[in-house]
Amino acid sequence: MCGIDFPVDPNLIVGMDSPDDAGVYKVTDDLAIIETVDFFTPIVDDPFWFGQIAAANALSDIYAMGGKPKTAMNLVGFPIDDMDIGILREIIQGGLEKLKEANVVLIGGHSVEDRELKYGLSVTGLIHPDRVLTKKNIREGDLLILTKALGTGIINTSIKGGLAPEELIDRVTRLMATLNRDAATVMSEFPVNACTDITGFGLLGHLAEMLEGSGLGIRLEASTIPVIPEALEFAAMGFVPAGAHKNRNFRREMVYFSASIDPVLQDILFDPQTSGGLLLSVGKSQAPALLDTLKRKGVKDSAIIGEVSHDPPGRIVID
């Protein structure tokens, strides 16, 4: 952030000078802590599921850095005069259930009275300083693996429009509430070069972050990218969130679509995700085995979606 003088520390591994999914601080030669925070307004009507999704989303940053989440603190904004306190209890219970699933301990939190309901978590994880993964270490020849299907932003928009059937709402809710733990566990067994999780900037926005400053290019094969089937239908009907258009406008100069790429799919590639999957950059020789292991461990939507190349530098090409 231009013009701001941030404190410096020689033990800071990842901080404001190279923003990533989380910050990392070295405690000893064998131990570093990962810190992140995330919260948002409700994206589903059910408060228990909202709590689960918000918790899974916050935990994801730790997984994306290659670490294991250990402790968490609640962050709450609640309109106490306009909403039953029982709703807040359900949200927090949902978050707790997800923390238990992740073997994470809740150690506190903070709440404020707010006109708009908000919930999320600050999370602390652990990692060896030499095993930290960042989004800025892609290498020429790497293959890119995505672990969750795209389209949650478009589906959530269709839910708000009252058009999504109950079966779809349930399926997508469970997808968003699914931890990236299993994918991260598999990832730890392979020499992955870079990783990020797909959230508000959409697939192409997060790929652009990985690409910036590398001098490399990225080529995606559109037919291999996992997409929620109904997202294609709703995007064609115009249920594309405003965030997708903002993402497209921001990264327009970095992205090139072949003439054969359907505009509907283009919208999905910019679609802001909630608690999306991990995006891994791994050497070509290791990628098939990594993908096979992901699928055997139940990360069934995982797919190799593209490759890091030297040409065209600074551009993402979708064929």
Image (spheres, rainbow, N blue to C red):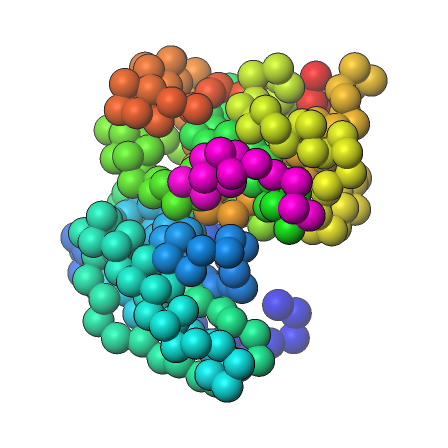
Task: Give the image location of residue 292, x and y in percent.
Answer: 33, 15
Task: Give the image location of residue 53, x and y in percent.
Answer: 41, 51
Q: Is residue 7 above or below residue 307?
A: below
Horizontal side of 287 relative to 254 (left or right) equals left
Quarter placement of the C terminus: top right
Horizontal side of 99 relative to 308 (left or right) equals left
Q: Is residue 81 above or below residue 124?
A: below
User: Which residue is painted at 43% across and 30% down in the image?
Assistant: 147
Quarter placement of the N terminus: bottom right
Horizontal side of 114 relative to 184 (left or right) equals right
Please name the predominant secondary structure of the magenta segment in the image: helix
User: Which residue is painted at 77% across and 34% down in the image?
Assistant: 237
Q: Is residue 281 visible?
A: no
Q: Is residue 260 above or below residue 94?
A: above
Say if the magenta span includes residue 169. yes
The foreground one among 195 and 243 is: 243
Say if the magenta span includes residue 254. no
Give residue 177's quadrant in the image: top left
Task: Give the image location of residue 218, x and y in percent.
Answer: 62, 26
Find the magenta span and give its range.
161-174
The foreground one among 306 and 274 is: 274
